[in-house]
Image (cartoon, rainbow, N blue to C red):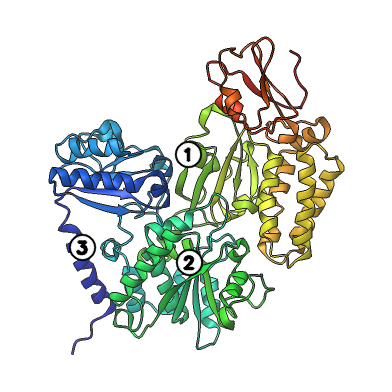
Amino acid sequence: MKVITAVERYTELKTKAQEKVNSLQDKPLVRIGTATCGLAAGALQVKETFEEEIKNKGLDVRIQEVGCMGHCYAEPLAIISKPGFPSFCYGKVDEGLAKLLVDSFLENDDPCYEYAMVALEPNDIFPTFTDFPRDAYEKKIILEHCGFIDPGDIEHYIAHEGYAALAKALEEMKPEEIISEMTASGLRGRGGAGFPVGKKWSLCKDTPDEVKYIICNADEGDPGAFMDRNVLESNPHQVIEGMLISAYTVGAEKGYIYIRNEYPLAIQRIETALEQAREIGLLGDSIFGSPFNFDLEIFEGSGAFVCGEESALVSSMEGKMGIPQARPPYMAVSGFRGRPTVLNNVKTFAYVPTIIRKGADYFKSVGTSDSSGTAVFTLVGKVANTGLVEVPMGTTLRQLIFDIGEGIPAEKEFKAVQIGGPSGGCLPETKLDIPIDFDSLAEAGAIMGSGGLVVLDEDDCMVAIARYFLEFTQQESCGKCTFCRLGTKHMLDILTRITQGKGEMADLEILQELAEDIKMGSLCNLGKTAPNPILTTLRYFRDEYEAHILEGRCPACMCKDLILYYIVPEKCSKLCNVCVGSCPVEAIYTREDGLKAIDQEKCVKCDNCLKTCPPEHDAVIKLSPPVLPED
């Protein structure tokens, strides 16, 4: 009796999947992005409009839900493919545009290219539509299929080489060879620490124990970060395949995906992916007909930021308080339930299939000599094109913000970028040309982190920003370490006084000293990195601290205790009462001459009057220091 190999079993699955996909290519297809960003922008309503219009016209058109392409600023997104035309991507699709596209493009042959963002394939008719500025900078490995395949259909993943790496690993590679390939690739953990993956897997494999575990850390808690969520919502099987390869390598038969319960859509799509993988024998016993057994389940976390730290994460899984533990022993030696455990981030596992399928040299050819591969970032804050990007390591911050993100909106001036999450650093314009890699960012006082990137402009006060991020980490501290528990609280109190105009110059020396002590005295990286926003703002924006302390003013007019709102009489219109109606505390009154003024004692500085004053008047201004101009 012939023994069917893993590769042969995979080939059967791929052939079937490709036949299914190819059989539908002669029909028009509408892909609609229904990741969280798309749903929040109204993608479901757009999908319903497409369905209704297509049904009413009796058209044979398929509608497919996909994940996110990364262009979150343009959601809802729709990609329309029609035989004889390139696939066109349309952004900011509403119900009206959906109806127009059905009428003009799907029913007839007018693609309405004046509404299209880009054509996804080269075409002689519309050659310029294939030029998308960010394409010159992006290199997609993790995000390659996000926004194009259906995350709820395993055959879509298989048809695009999905699970080919697993079949190759099971049939052609020994665990030692996989570890050698991972080591040669130079892949470092993308959860923030940047630990070499090959070294971690090797340590776990060589630790003698009959029971070992694989855990995927999807406990993404950084403000403004959604990289892991996007990957799990858009292509969950890529992460599952990476975990399967890791399990085969180290000898584990059980794995968990630890994800915060604030990600309901990601959880739903992972559950579907796990069920589909079990149905065709990719999870459970004798995977691909081999002796390899492995199964996965989801563990929902409760949203504690500190549980992003691996030992705290494992403690919470064991039913204990999510508090970091001293190391050694390390997770790879003694982790979940005291057993050897490989614990990697979502993005780290997602790289594995590509490295095994295409080889370490391919991955090593991308990026820099010391930081190979790509980096996935969320672009949020004061940037024109918010969303998700994947760029080679070594790309500069300037290219990321101004070439991919297309700069600062509303003609504002760039001030800083917060990189690495709440424990990252705030870097000024003079640091925009440093390459993005683990070592260069560390030299500048920042960290790579998990990939959160917040852009700040001239209206942001760096003292208030440092206070905001420190308040977050201080509240999320587990309280185990005295330096972290009390030190961050003391720093927060000092920053609060400074933003209120009550600081002293001696406070800056105390902040510097406290920050260094907390970094040295904290057990886990939450405490060790919590002072980074203070240290970098003191280093690069000391003048703003001094303005608050010495001059009693906030240069960015952001700190409420140091600003006031004022109505310029020469610009105010006697016939306009918009600002009066917008004030929630009735602080705006009408003077004897009919013009408006603000009672500073009543004003709560809510910003409503400034926002609602008609542009043609532009009579409300924000000032600092808090001294009323003379009438």
Q: CA distance from mark 3 to mark 2?
A: 32 Å
Q: Position of residue 228 (x, y in %)?
A: 47, 58
Q: Look at the numbered disc 1 and give the secondary structure of its residue.
A: loop
Which of the marked residues, 1 or 3, is nearer the chain's N terminus?
3
Which of 591 and 462 lies nearest the eye of the viewer? 591
Q: Circle 2: is it few (<14), some (14-19), or many (20+) Cα within 10 Å? A: some
Disc sitting over residue 405 in the figure: 1
Q: Position of residue 104 (x, y in %)?
A: 18, 35
Q: Is residue 447 above or below residue 319?
A: above
Which of the marked residues, 2 or 1, is nearer the chain's N terminus?
2
Label 3 close to label 2 by CB (< 8 Å) = no
Looking at the rendered structure, the number of numbered marks drawn on it comes to 3
Disc sitting over residue 184 in the figure: 2
Q: Is residue 182 above or below residue 220?
A: below
Q: CA distance from mark 2 to mark 1?
A: 33 Å
Q: Quadrant of the C terminus?
A: top right
- Label 3, on which residue? 18
The amino acid type, in three-letter code, at marker 1 is Gly
- Residue at image point 19% right, 87% down: 2
Q: Nearer the observer, disc 2 or disc 1?
A: 1
The amino acid type, in three-letter code, at marker 3 is Gln
Quarter residue 574 falls in: top right
Quarter residue 504 falls in: top right
Q: Look at the numbered disc 2 and give the secondary structure of its residue.
A: helix
Q: Look at the numbered disc 3 and give the secondary structure of its residue.
A: helix
Q: Position of residue 140 (x, y in %)?
A: 40, 52
- Residue at image point 31% right, 62% down: 152
Q: Is residue 213 above or below residue 461?
A: below
Q: Nearer the observer, disc 3 or disc 2?
A: 3
